[in-house]
Amino acid sequence: MASSSQWELPSIPTSSLDFGGGIDTSFIAFEGASSAVTPPKPAHPQSSQQPPVVRSTEVHYSADDLVAIWGRVGVHLCEAATQLYEKSKKSLVGDGTYTGFVHAALDEVPNAARSPPPAWGYLVYSQSAASVQKRLSDIMPGDIVVLFDAKLKGHKGLATYNQTVGAGEPLVGIVSEFEPKKSKIRVFQANQHVGHQTVEAASYRLEDLKSGIVKVYRVLEA
């Protein structure tokens, strides 16, 4: 009877075990398993390398720095513009354009840096109509001035004057003198009048600017 009534347990495949509730049984390790279970990797692993730091290439100069730069570059640029002004009485300077004259003067100063357009150096002064938006340094001889569609109206002596410059093509010149009390700037610039010397000396009162923009750049050292 013992041999005929012996119970035999059926073999149940482990893959068919159902624990219910959608429980994942893949983590269960049975004794004698040939490989270990590898823990899951994080969804977003952190890189050990930090992203490169982007640094600004713009250099900021103090008022003292700008004066020192003027002493090394601006003085010589003003001298070069003055010499070209005298030379223009007998011959053409540059290609006859505003920018052509300025480039010709820059060519005479070996340590003068060439700034990418539309800038001509470090912006030290900016004025829109009657509002001064930036003044980092006094305007100095040898600075480059640009006038964009500038309309000036004021008095010269007892007479009233109206003047428009830089309409269409910006007027670009080199400062020869600046009078802070009168806010008057004297400029060497290409002469656009046929039959005259190719470089002229002109003056503008910044306090008479009614519309348009005036920008003054300090030429940097190469």
Image: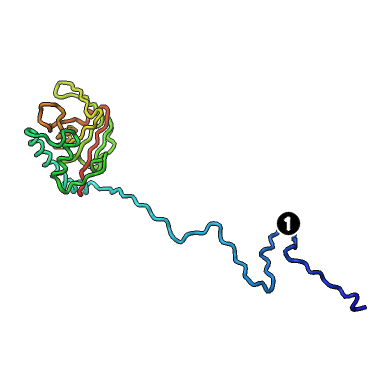
Residue extending farthest bottom? 2
Q: Which residue is drawn at 20% across and 39% down?
A: 144
Residue extending farthest right? 1
Relative image position of residue 216 (x, y in whole percent): 22, 38
Q: In this view, does 148 lie above or below 48?
A: above
- Residue 140 in view (yes/no): no
176 on left or right of 170:
left
Q: Which of 151 and 110 is in front in this view?
A: 110
Relative image position of residue 119 (x, y in whole percent): 26, 40
Q: Nearer the viewer, residue 196 or 145?
A: 196
**Pointer 1 local density, CA inside 10 Å: few below 14, some 14–19, many at least 20:** few
Q: Residue at x 18, y 24 (%)?
A: 155
Snapshot quadrant of residue 131: top left
Q: How many marks?
A: 1
Q: In this view, does 160 lie above or below 81?
A: above
Relative image position of residue 7 (x, y in whole percent): 86, 73
Q: Check disc 1 and report the residue beneath it.
A: 21
Q: How is the image coloured?
A: rainbow
Q: In this view, does 23 lie above or below 109?
A: below
Q: Residue at x 69, y 63 (%)?
A: 25
Snapshot quadrant of residue 19: bottom right
Q: Which residue is drawn at 24% across and 38% down?
A: 125
- Residue 108 in view (yes/no): yes
Snapshot quadrant of residue 209: top left
Quarter of the figure that contains the N terminus: bottom right
Instruction: Assign a secondary structure to mark 1.
Output: loop
192 on left or right of 126:
left
Relative image position of residue 34 (x, y in whole percent): 64, 72
Q: Which of 1 and 106 is in front in this view?
A: 1
Q: Which of 123 and 191 is in front in this view?
A: 191
